[in-house]
Amino acid sequence: MSFYIANCLLEIMSYDTVYQKDKKDCIFSKKIIEQLNSLVPNGVSDKEVDRVAYSKDYWPITLRWLLDGKLPALPDCIVWPENAQHVTEILRLANREKIPIVPFGEGSGVVGGAIPIRGGIVVDMKKMDSVVEIDDLGLMVTAQPGINGMNLERYLNRKGYTMGHIPQSIYCSSLGGWLACRAAGQFSTKYGKIEDMVVALEAVLPDGTIIKSKPVPRSSTGPQVEQLFLGSEGRFGIITEATLKIWPYPEERSMISFAFDDVDHALEAVRKIMRKNVYPAVVRIYDKNETLRHFYEIKGAKDKCMLVLLMEGDKRLVKLENEISEITCKGGGGVACGDEPVHHWLETRFNVKESSEFTSRGFIFDTVEVSVGWKNAPNLYKTVIEAMRKVGGVVVASGHASHFYPQGVCFYFTFGGISPKDVTPFTFYESVWDAIMKSCLEEQGSISHHHGIGLIRAKWLEKEIGERMHMLKKIKSAIDPHNIMNPGKMVIESEEN
Amino acid sequence: MRVKKTKKYAWVMDAFSQTSFSTKARAMKHFLTGKKSYLPMKKTQADMESVIKCALCPNMCRFDCPVLEAEKNEATSPSGKMRIAYLIETGRLDGKDAFELMYKCAGCDACIQWCPFDFSVGDILKGVRADIVADNRIPEDAAGIKEHLEKNHTMNKRNVDIKGSEKGDILYFMGCTILSEKGEIAEAMMGIFNTVGEKYTTIMDEWCCGAPLINLGFTKTFKHFAEHNVEKIKDSGCKTVVCSCPTCAYILRQVYSQMNFEIKAQVLHSSEYLLSLMKDKKMRFGHLEKECVYHDPCTLVRKLGIEEEPRKVLKNIPGMVVKEPYFSRMDTKCCGRGGSLGNTNPDIAEKIAQKRIAELIDEAKCIVTACPTCTLAFDGCEVYDISEIVIKSLEKKNE
């Protein structure tokens, strides 16, 4: 473990500072605020209430901070740019003055990526939330990054299109956030992940330079450097516009489900469906505990693993996909459960209640998503579940698979529990995370499928990407020599920074 | 019911069955007592359990919140407000900006339909504001509204001087917006009463229904207003109270009774009343060539559940073409003036109104709604209350 990583960990672990009223006054230079005000008139705030509001994202640790009255990561001010030029001016100033910059969409990230742990300027992109253009001929939409996901999808639906990117956070996340963490939606098996949808990007580098790629289907013009921004978690600059693929709104939807004896059999059925080049939009396999949790009212689901499939698109294609999937599932030992489980999933898929219900009761819940090739998939599932269960205090350890590829699968694990006596909640929480990350790496998985690195995964990144870390650090220090962009996340600073 | 609940939590029981005794014991202890450690020491009027749940939510309703849409500030998001509310209630945060934030809500209830707990952020905030009142930390604007109402009894200067008979089966409760600025709606309603031969009365010293008071946390003063209005309604001997304002109808019909101020008469919103006249064949509509878009007022559709009544009336008028905006019925968008936002934060209200106007006039130039406050918010457009359309059509018949 490098010195820097150890330091960063220490920094995270030491977030026990209780918010002190006598220390709440903004110590940020008034001169900087004045300069920002002149760059972005009516778009700057250093009010205490705003700084508190921007001191979090949806990392479960920040929820506990709130209840414990801890506000350890206050930004110094918030700025709301209205165009790319504003962003350029803000970054130039920050670069000159070496002030940390934290780009902010809607703060729905779950790994601590948007928490301003070093203070500085939060750049909230919400005022850049327009749909710039729909290109019907080329099936593309160009939009600004601050647009809310649901508002973008609603806009497209109204015009007769869909982007097919429907993450569980669609109500509370932004386009910029999706791009910055390489997001995946519930319908991703058909429509792809956010990086599959991006056609072109405009972004501002830390020195204020605006870069822009062309909205063309493909180029053989060297490495597409703008793609560094996908998954950059705000470390390379700020995305100011994106052009993405869209599709005509599907004319037909078909829903089927099957109960399998175990996860392995369900995985095998889906692998065979994928192998036939059939891509249902939604594919979800729930293990026995999650089947009991979500489908307790479904006949035939008891002590089984539920597979739900949703196909959509052209009527004839949907019919065919339905037929192939059905034959494959039945052939693999699946018992048909009709469309009710799929309807149930559709109706309840945005009911995010666990944190609200259990955090104040001292319970700690979190979800961890990883990806793995088919060869190691069954083992990884079993190893991770076992590893979670072994951590003292864990009550719930379950999983489902929710994004599929001909090459492999994404597992989405849930753990919940209570810290044992004499163990702090954070230590308990981190122990479960460590157990999952370690098992995942042992089973040749990737430590994140779509939530990103942020703070909680930072110490595992080097183990995940190996020598590529060195390259990433070189790129980072070349683009952002003063390390102003979202410092402390992903831990790709050079050690001297 | 119990069986269903047992099944619902079977997964938790299943998970618990696989844990050690010490984990079970510790979990049970936390489950039963954990919450208390996060509640404020003092007794609050705010429902703290709801405040906490909402504060811990990822903000699933934020995309439909008109205030956030106008302000673009995380603090004004529904969950953002609840986080600050929690810090205020637990004594960790104070200051003018924090208190003022608690009033930045249109009370439109768009949040309810996306909330897994069916929370109304506007309703939760009423309790938080009541605590702010109890602590005497009331923002200037809110305090001014209370003082004004205590002195004048209506939100603005009374400009309408319409009265019916001394007694009547119908009592027309005008509401502050009509009394001060939208007299034309009262005239339309009077015209309808007269055309159908209904004997109606009004309250000469009608007071505000109290909505701004309860919204802003002045529960005690609200009760005083409720007492006055209930007494006057009783004195009138009416069988039915008709309100053009959905908020008045909601307050009179539901909130008064929740606070033990019973109105024996039936309380109807004007759209319900007009539909009943239509069903009883008391209205004969004339041809009215008009294309309009119907805007659902938030309180009418979300608090009173009235969607169909105004549409049925409008669609029955010969020559009338009623268009639907993309966001209609339960998905409607706020006009900006709900929850007293027009008084406490007029700039935000105006931004919200402009956005809604743009959505509406995308469908038709003429806007029809069923709320005087919405018509006020859409001032400058061709906008009518449903009663104004109805009286136009009735007059056409009599031409």
Image: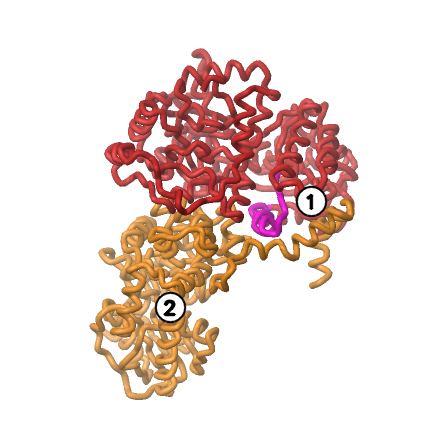
Chain colours: A red, B orange
In this orientation, does residue A196 appear?
no
Q: Nearer the viewer, residue B33 or B85?
A: B33
The percent position of residue B170, horizontal first and vertical second, equals 36, 82
Q: Residue at x 74, y 32 (%)?
A: A382
The relative height of residue A455 versus residue B166 in the rendered view (above or below) is: above
Q: Kindly report which numbered mark, 1 or 2, lies closer to the viewer in this rendering.
A: 1
Q: Residue at x 53, y 49 (%)?
A: A67
Task: Kindly indicate the quadrant of the structure image that contains residue A420.
Answer: top right
The percent position of residue B397, horizontal first and vertical second, equals 28, 73
Side (left or right) of A335 relative to B293 = right
Q: Quadrant of the C terminus of chain B?
A: bottom left
Q: Nearer the viewer, residue B195 or A419?
A: A419
The relative height of residue B383 versus residue A118 in the rendered view (above or below) is: below
Q: Nearer the viewer, residue A222 or A486?
A: A486
User: Which residue is denoted by mark 2 in the rendering?
Assistant: B218
Disc 2 residue type (three-letter): Phe
Structural crowding at the residue carrying mark 2, measured as other residues with C-alpha within 10 Å and reported as few (<14), some (14–19) or many (≥20):
many
SS for dot 2 = loop
Kindly report the distance in space between the C-alpha atoms of the residues bearing marks 1 and 2: 46 Å
SS for dot 1 = loop
Callout 1 and callout 2 share a chain: no
Question: Is-magenta flag for residue A347?
Answer: yes
The segment highlighted magenta reads A346-367
- Which chain is disc 2 placed on? B
Side (left or right) of B391 relative to A331 = left
Structural crowding at the residue carrying mark 1, measured as other residues with C-alpha within 10 Å and reported as few (<14), some (14–19) or many (≥20):
few
The percent position of residue A259, horizontal first and vertical second, equals 74, 42
Disc 1 residue type (three-letter): Lys
Q: Quadrant of the N terminus of chain B?
A: bottom right
In this orientation, does residue A24 appear?
yes
Question: Is-magenta flag for residue B213?
Answer: no
Which mark is on residue A421?
A: 1
